[in-house]
Amino acid sequence: MTARIIDGKTVAAALRETIAARAATLSFRPGLRVVRVGEDPASGVYVRNKDKAARQVGFDSATIALPETTSEAELLAVVARLNADDAVDGILVQLPLPPQIRADRVIAAVAPEKDVDGFHPLNAGRLASGQPGLVPCTPKGVMHLLKASGAALPGARAVVLGRSNIVGRPMAQLLLAADCTVTVVHSRTRDLPAECRRAEILIAAVGRPEMVRGDWVEDGATVIDVGINRLEDGRLVGDVAFAEAARHAEAITPVPGGVGPMTIACLLENTLDAALARRG
């Protein structure tokens, strides 16, 4: 079996086109502000890509760059100012933050209706209880990819490898809402390969390069690889050993070019949704 590739670049491009078309009909430009603290190179590249993508779809987008020495109180003051700014529909504080700043305090300070990352406790609670709210971008992107792949979700056995608040937990909630039968597995799970082999839909989000081997994948499964890891030789790989898994899977996402492009596209979708909800 040779797996069909789920092309995240193509799906993300189509979603961005739809967002741009919707934004063009509005009498205002949705406002997005990204707050970056420090000079982490990877974060810098990611933030620039977000800014570029937001402007391409017609948003009013800007990055607020703060020094590494910014205090927690100073960052909270910036967030409070953005919360009060009617021209701002979406606020994203780029993680990770320097050690002097508690990320949970900052996340909770963002107005829930402007929380386009979907990390605020209120939005997490809405997702867990099946109520509408802003959803974390990466899990939301995975759901777009599953739809594009043609995967039959109702009743499917879905296994989520990873239990982070950013991906694993919201991913499980979205799959439950789509009527999947969901199992969440992690580093303490007994016989992890056997649990993964039970999956018709396998979502890998652990941040460990090529942890999921080919014999962890059931023949005919759909595999979504959320991980992105840089090896010592400079190569980017996912959490799944791609070549091995592709011999068993029916469909699989590559790294790069799979989930990554969807995260930014879904940030734009969240920003548009937040703008429309805020402005009626």
Image (cartoon, helix red, strand yellow):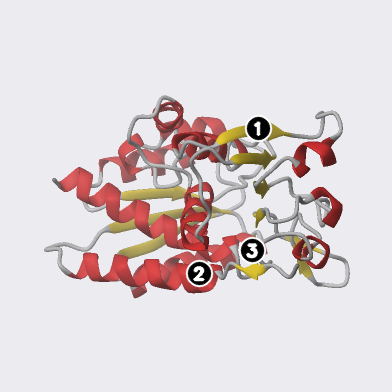
Q: Is residue 89 left or right of residue 221?
A: left
Horizontal and vertical percent position of residue 270: 36, 51
Viewer-nearest residue: 247 or 228: 247
Estimate the x, y position of residue 200 in percent, counting from the top left: 65, 46
Q: Where does label 3 land, which residue? A: 253
Instruction: Identify which residue is drawn at 69% across, 56% down.
Output: 220
**Front disc: 2 or 3:** 3
Residue placed at 64% from the left, 37% from the top? Answer: 164
Mark 3–mark 1 Cα distance, whole angstroms, equals 20 Å
Give x and y (percent) for residue 26: 15, 63
- Image quadrant holding the N terminus, namely bottom right
On residue 153, the disc is none
Query: Which residue type carries mark 2?
Result: Asn
Examine the image and state in which quarter residue 196 appears.
top right
Q: Please report whichever mark, 1 or 2, sits nearer to the chain's N-terminal start.
A: 2
Q: Which residue is mark 2?
A: 49
Q: Earlier in the sequence, mark 2 or mark 3?
A: 2
Q: Amino acid at mark 1?
A: Thr
Label 3 amino acid?
A: Thr
Nearer-N-terminus badge (3/1): 1
Asked which secondary structure carries label 3, the reply is loop
Secondary structure of the residue carrying tag 1 is strand
- The answer to whether 190 is drawn above or below residue 63 in the figure is above
